Structure formats: structure tokens, C-alpha cells
Image: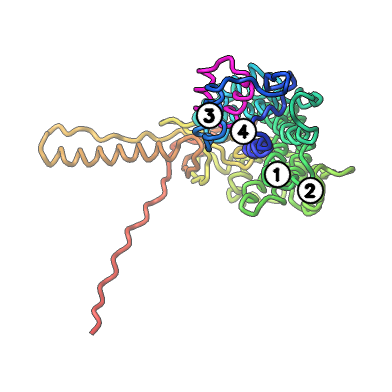
Amino acid sequence: MNKAAIASLLALSAFTVAPALLSHHGAAFAQAPTGQVQMDAPEFADYDNCMNKQTTPQTQAPCLEAYLTKYPKSSVRTDVLQRIMLDYSQFDPAKSIIAADNYLAVSPNNLQAYLIEVAYRTQAAQDPKVDAATKQAGLDTVATYAKKGLEITKLPLDPKSGMTQAQLDAIVAIATPTFYGAIAADAMNNKDGAGAIAAYKSELAAIKPDQLTQPATLQEVFFLAQAYRLLTPPDYTSCAFYATRAAALAPAQFQGQLQPTANYCYKKQHGVMDGYDAVVAAAKSNPNPPPGFTITPAPTDKDIADGLMKTTADADIPKLATGDKEFVLANASPENAAKVWDSVKGKSYQIPGALVIESSPTVLKVAVSDDAVQGKKADYSFTLKPLTAPEEPKAKTPVALAAYKKAKAAYDKEVADDAAATAVGKTVTLAGTYDSYTPNPIMINMTDGEIILPKAEPAAKPKPVVHHK
């Protein structure tokens, strides 16, 4: 919700040319007894040039910075620092953060500055280019600003701020859910399910009722659903409810991304999808689970695994889906697990759609089952057959060297193609021979692993030219 918060903040700040909206520490202007700012003519000319003749944030911000450099003791210094901050927030996030730091140094209780700090520091922390440790450190810093911002939302209106209570309330209405959302994101990234749940629920409670079905809000609802999976043990009932609400009310183009988590949590709680329509109806009509809302627990994983084997003839065990075989190996009685393992041990299979979790030229660890893919945890380990590099010819004849060069180029291309196809996060088809397994946590080891790359489409043949008489 950061972008929306900044946009709303700028809209609310437009009511004054010289905003000092939320300072709780005195007036922004040093006033003469008559109430007018004291400023000599040359300084006023420079100030007027920046404030009234620079018509874009891109020109006004550097103009005001130059003004403060020239007049460091200006009577409107606090106001100018705030204007610089608001200007940069419209086009330069990095300078906006610096400007917010500068403004908080003189106006430490300004909500606008905390909103900008939270919004743009979150954006920087979540840059895909930063590593995990830097991201967590950045989100921790954001949460610190957000918690301080929440304290400021509870302060009463300062009569010297130049604001009305309605204007303050409007800023607080934007700031409160934004701050809670930042705290929740920090907890979520740190795998703190309980902390994330508390913050997300406070965020959603602070959002106006008419905004509860907007896409940005439903995204937070979906994150809340995922937070319930971080608990020990996971709360799949709450996960199913909130993920279902997010999926059911989201625009059509997003439903495909949200619904799998809703289905997953419902099946983890109930076992099968029957009765799910009642969850959809409740979730669409209620922002939180209504009183008495429950989802009947599913049989245990052992019950399901042994039940599957009870209904599967011995001759049909090899025909079970890969995920079902894995489920039985991990959860069934030793007798039933042995039946499945005896049906696959030493045999070669091709496994499509494996999600790469760890990758090296010799070993691939991948997620195959739905649980493994959802949790991004490897459940299969493939020991790959080594590729054989061509040997340089002993006879350095032109023909032999040309053949070697061609073979070496083909080998290098195969190595590069395999590396690209098996990068972490990629989905790939693999083949291998069942060798061994451990049931808890499940890890199935495959030998003679091969990477099955999709075949290139043959080039279309040109259509023959037809000459018409």
C-alpha cells in the first residue's frame, strides 16, 4: 500500500503552499509580532523564486536546497525542509529518504516524514538485487520507523500546526494501516508468524470498510493467510479462509495466482475439496471468520496414505502418481511404504515440472510434490550423469581439428543450456533411477540423473510459390 499512501499524502498536502502539517513541536514559521515572516528583500526574492516560480518538483527541490545553503538560518527553514521532502517524494525515492531524515532532525514528530521513510525504505529493502541479510536489515529499519510513526498517530492535534482536526485525521487514516503493514512485512520476512498475524490484522482493522475489497487490501489479506502457515503447528483453517477471501474478491487476472494457496490450505485442513463452497460464501461476505466458523479436520496423513494403499491393487502401485508414491513413502505404515518402494527401486522414471531448489553441475535438489513446491523445500535429489567433454585430437589435421571444434562447441552449448535450465527457481523435467530414500523429512535419491530439455521446434518450411495463369 506504499504507493497509494504516498499519493494520498501528496494530495492531502496540497492544501497549503508552505505545509507544516503534522509538527507537534511548535510553529513552522518564525513570526514577527504581526504574524508575518521576517525576511529581507534579497532572501525573499530567492525564496519567492523557488516557491512560486519553480513549477515542478524537479526544479523546486534543488532550488530550495540552494536557498538553504545560502540562508542556513532562514526563519522558514523547517517549512522549506518539508517542501524539499515532499518534492523529492514525487520523483526521487533515494533523495526523498535523505530529505525525510533532514526534516525529522528538526521536526521529529512529523507523520509525513515517517510515511515517506516507511514507503521508500521498504521499496529499497525489497529490491530484487539486494541479498537476504540486507533485505531483512532494511525491513527491520522500516519497522522501527513504522512503530515510531504509530506512536505519533496517537498524539493530539497541536494548535500551532496550522491544521484542522479533520486534516490530521485524514493523514492518520493513511498512516495507520501503512505502518502496521510495514511491521507485518518485517515479521513475515523474519518467519515470525504470530507477529505478522497481529500486525496484518491491525492493518486491516484500520482500513476503511469501503476499501476492504480493493486489490491492494486483498493482497494484504493474502499475506495474512500465508502468515498462518508460519505458525507451529500451522493454522490451515484461518489460512484457507483469508486466502479464499483474497482469491474470491480479487480481479480475475490475479485469481489464478491466489487460488492455489486457498485450495492447498483447505485440503491440508479437510483432506479433500468437498464443502469448499461454504468457505467461499463465508469469506466473500465477512472480512474475518464469522463466529462458529470451522473446517472439519482431515484424516491424518497416515490414515490417508494407508487408505490409498488399501484401495490400490498391488498391480496398480507402479501406476500411482509420483506425488502419491512420495506421500505413501513419507506417511504410510512401514508395510505399505515398502510395497511402494519395491515397485520403483532400481527403475527409471521421467519427472516433469520439478522446481529447482539447489543446483550444481553434479547434484540437483528439487521440489516435486505439492507440499514441497508450496514450501520451496527439496524432496528429490538427482545425482547427474557427467557430460563427456570431447578430447583434443592427437593428429592435428584440419579435418580432425574442425571436427573437435564442432564437438567442443556442441558440448559447451549443452553445458550452458543445462545450467540455464537448472538455475534455482526454474522448473525442469528430469529423468533418473530410484536409488534410496529417507521418510522424515522425505528425500528421494535418484541416480543416473539426466536433464530433459525441450526440443527445439523445427523451422517452418517455406511454402512453394504458386504461379497462377
Identity, as a three-letter code, of the amino acid under mark 4: Ile
Disc 2 and disc 1 in contact, CB within 8 angstroms:
no
Residue 283, numbered label = 2
Q: In 3D space, how far apart are the residues under numbered discs 1 and 3 (Cα atoms)?
A: 36 Å
Disc 4 and disc 1 in contact, CB within 8 angstroms:
no
Q: Nearer the viewer, mark 3 or mark 2?
A: 3
Q: In 3D space, how far apart are the residues under numbered discs 2 and 4 (Cα atoms)?
A: 34 Å
Q: Nearer the viewer, mark 2 or mark 1?
A: 1
Q: In 3D space, how far apart are the residues under numbered discs 4 and 1 (Cα atoms)?
A: 34 Å
Viewport quadrant of the N terminus = top right
Q: Is residue 71 on the magenta stretch? A: yes
Residue that label 3 marks: 61
Residue occupying image coordinates x 66% and y 39%: 11
Q: Residue furthest top?
A: 73
Of the numbered discs 2 and 1, the one sitting upstream in the chain is: 1
Q: Nearer the viewer, mark 2 or mark 4?
A: 2
Residue 218, numbered label = 1
- Image-based side of 372 in relation to 424, left or right: right
